[in-house]
Image (tube, rainbow, N blue to C red):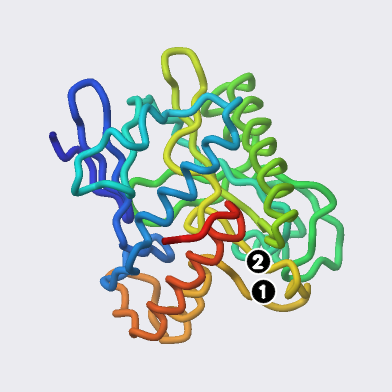
């Protein structure tokens, strides 16, 4: 196998005419991989993503096999089709928080979409919105508008990206809500398998989404979460400037983060993490 790419969390290997996507235990916040791993994180992300790929079986995806992988990668790798990736991060938001909240507070809009006045941190939006961003190879992704995607990819492709993203978010959030989890927002990525727009990377995981416990949702404040927002909040509290290198994560934060990833997996899938 040939190691062809090291991302902030995932490694990509070329194996003949297929690829192996391997999730590490690294955790990335503010586009910086922190030096301390979260035990089992790679396997938890992979297994949750695999569960969602089955849930969205009607959406073409890049998965060839979840089991035909080298033994040392078992449980945290999948064999996938090579895709020509679309250079857009496709984000759907159903609730206002994070970067979207900051933009709204400054302009009353998110990615060029006007929202009602008076919304607070954690408020549910009137309907889910498509808020894409750039796909930066280094540094931070930047929010862009739907028109920017049209200019880059053409209107037909932009509309497909938007509609697929919102469909995945809406259906996924509906299932999660039935399990007591709010999906505040999520990011998905697409690529071309020939002329077929295909779902790649990961889907609705604790790294690509904000998961909130529904019974603790209270707009007007930061929400408790089942995702890496917990690590984001901790890293911000240290005074770190959000530039490399990131801070070492204390053992108690590592353990609490792992528990949150496990809880998200178990609630959403209905399975017990062994």
In the image, 150 versus 164, the foreground residue is 164
Residue 19 image point, x, y percent: 27, 31
In the image, 114 versus 120, the foreground residue is 120
Mark in front: 1 vs 2 = 2
In terms of image quadrants, where is residue 209?
Answer: bottom right
37 sits left or right of 262 in the view: left
Q: Residues within 10 Å of mark 2 (few under 14, many from 20)?
A: many
Q: Secondary structure at mark 2?
A: strand
Q: Residue at x 73, y 70 (%)?
A: 121
Q: Secondary structure at mark 1?
A: loop
107 sits left or right of 157 in the view: right
Which residue position is annotated with label 1? 223
Residue 212: which numbered mark, if any? 2
Instruction: Name above or below for residue 79 compared with residue 126.
Output: above
Query: Decide: marks 1, 2 in contact (CB < 8 A)?
Result: yes
Residue 226 image point, x, y percent: 56, 67
């Amino acid at each position: 196998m040939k190691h062809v790419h090291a991302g902030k969390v995932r490694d990509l290997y070329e194996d003949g005419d297929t690829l192996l996507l391997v999730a590490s235990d690294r955790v990335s916040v503010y586009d910086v991989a922190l030096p301390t791993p979260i035990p089992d994180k790679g396997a938890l992300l992979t297994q949750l993503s695999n569960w969602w790929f089955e849930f969205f079986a009607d959406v073409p995806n890049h998965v060839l096999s979840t089991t035909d992988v080298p033994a040392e990668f078992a449980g945290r790798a999948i064999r996938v089709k090579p895709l020509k990736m679309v250079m857009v991060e496709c984000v759907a938001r159903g609730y206002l928080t994070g970067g979207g909240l900051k933009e709204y507070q400054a302009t009353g809009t998110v990615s060029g979409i006007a929202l009602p006045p008076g919304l607070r941190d954690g408020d549910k939006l009137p309907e889910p919105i498509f808020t894409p961003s750039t796909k930066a190879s280094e540094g931070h992704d930047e929010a862009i508008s739907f028109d920017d995607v049209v200019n880059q990819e053409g209107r037909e492709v932009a509309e497909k990206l938007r509609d697929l993203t919102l469909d995945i978010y809406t259906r996924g959030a509906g299932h999660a809500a039935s399990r007591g989890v709010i999906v505040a927002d999520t990011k998905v990525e697409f690529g071309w398998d020939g002329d077929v727009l295909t779902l790649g990377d990961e889907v609705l995981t604790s790294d690509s989404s904000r998961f909130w416990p529904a019974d603790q949702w209270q707009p007007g404040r930061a929400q408790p979460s089942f995702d890496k927002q917990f690590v984001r909040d901790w890293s911000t509290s240290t005074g770190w400037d959000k530039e490399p290198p990131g801070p070492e994560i204390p053992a108690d934060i590592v353990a609490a983060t792992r528990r949150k990833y496990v809880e998200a997996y178990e609630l959403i899938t209905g399975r017990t993490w062994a």
